[in-house]
Image (cartoon, grey):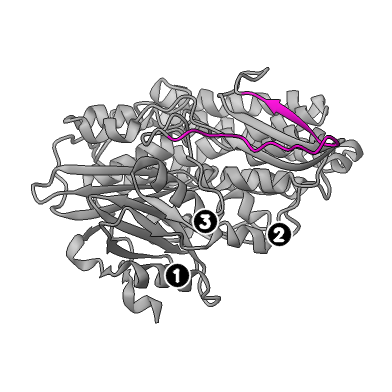
Amino acid sequence: MYRDNFYIVPDGVRAIPFENIPELTFKDFASCAVEALDDDTKDNVPLAYFQSEGKFFIVLFDYSTGNFLLTSSKSPKKVINSLGVDAYYQFERDIYERSKVSINNHPYLKPLRRPCSNNSVFDFETSTNVSLHEVNVGPVHAGIIEPGQFRFTCNGEQVLSVEICLGFQRRGIEQLIVDSSSNRKRMLLAEQISGDSVVANTIAMSNILEGQLDANQYQLIFHERALALEMERLAMHFADLAALAGDCAYYLGQIAIEPLRTTIINSLQLWCGSRSGRSLVRPSGSFYRLSLDEIDVVTNNINNVKKLFSDISSNLLSSPSLLSRLDGKCQLSQHSVKAFALRGTISKASNQPRDIRISSYSQVPYKNFTVQKLSKGDLLSRLKIRIMEVNQSIDIVLEFLNTIKSIWYETSKFPVYDSSLPKSSLILSPVEGFRGTILHVALSDQNSTLADYRIFDPSMMAWPVLAYAMKNQQISDFPVCNKSFNLSYLANDL
């Protein structure tokens, strides 16, 4: 039984001593990793597979029980075999890129980013078939967009394959976090991971730096963090909905939705002085506490957004031109989503309701919370999931504002930057960002010093699936399909 070879992390626990994590032979390690994904009674999803200090680690999260599963293998070999499962291929490309480990039998052993530490290059596939043509898009794009390069092989307008090359702005941010001796600087680095997920990533970093806080003593802080996270989710879902409407030439919808995002990010600015939530989240406390007057202003803003969005979403879902443009296009089956270990809005649109907010790792109770899902997995489903999550998050924000007002009497807690990490441990910090579950992993040594740090954004797993979703579609569908995924270049180019 594979579970005997995994350490099942108790509910809510973040720091796991290395001595608790099984160390298997690589053969048994690989066998268990594959067997865990074949268990139809669980929803085991690999959130991390990486090499550190000569050991391989796999981190699974079971969305059906809310438990993490950990195992490891010590393998000094320069060559290993691929695990042979789609869900691990991106992680294996990352291992190949970062180290001198070669991976046998990998179907697509190209570096995940460029330039690469092992001096590998990213060569696009070419075709000698004269009836086919290639279309290159990027890395410099026409709009305000991060750099990424797409190479389409087409038969007329039909896309036969897409290759995606990323890594044009790699910053080495994980190593900068390790090398920094200041937790203040580490928090600033966390804000740079991805500009659209500042709150999510700073919560993840804070959870690692502050250790296991008592929920009863930090109730106000946890609720304010959860409130900021939901406001970030709202802002980005509004941005995605506006972008989808605009790419479908439904400009009335676009110009109606964009002011709603502005209202949300202006509310964040009122709170902490930053429309993206910078400086708001800090370990064990915050310098920015919502005042009672600010709570009333934000509550009024959210109620206005709720009223306006009700009309706008009705119009979106009754526009014949928009519906015909999205319905049935670029579908992803439930099987594909499961095979590629996707989470977030993409998985929810294909009947895989994965969301870590239902677990104890959310730190605050989400009352009457159910994970949204649809089954068709097309462009329209991905738009509808965002509408459903917007309506859900609006109600959550209003609930949290009321809760914060009711416990406002609690004493303010200021940030603490000198907390030490537990010794010789692997520390997990998952947060449900607007794209899906983000996972930060820290490894400490016997001196409680940060030895390694890894960041796993949902975008990493989903980029190749964007290419998969475009197979046999019209190339004109790519801008809309790309918007429906809305993946981060920056969070991939760490």
The C terminus appears in which quarter of the rendering?
A: top left
Quadrant housing residue 9:
bottom left
- Residues drawn in magenta: 120-138
Relative side of 77 to 386, left or right: left
- Percent coordinates x, y for residue 203 in the rendering: 36, 41
Describe the element under mark 3 as helix, strand or loop. loop
Q: Earlier in the sequence, mark 2 or mark 3?
A: 2
Label 1 with label 3: CB-CB less than 8 Å: no
- Please name which of the two marks, 2 or 3, marks the residue nearer to the observer: 2
Tell me the kind of residue under disc 1. Thr
What separation in Å lies between label 2 and label 1 (alpha carbons)? 23 Å
> Residue at coordinates 64% horizontally, 41% vertically from top-left?
485
- Percent coordinates x, y for residue 293 in the rendering: 43, 28
Q: Which residue is mark 2?
A: 333
Q: Which residue is mark 3?
A: 355
Q: Earlier in the sequence, mark 1 or mark 3?
A: 1
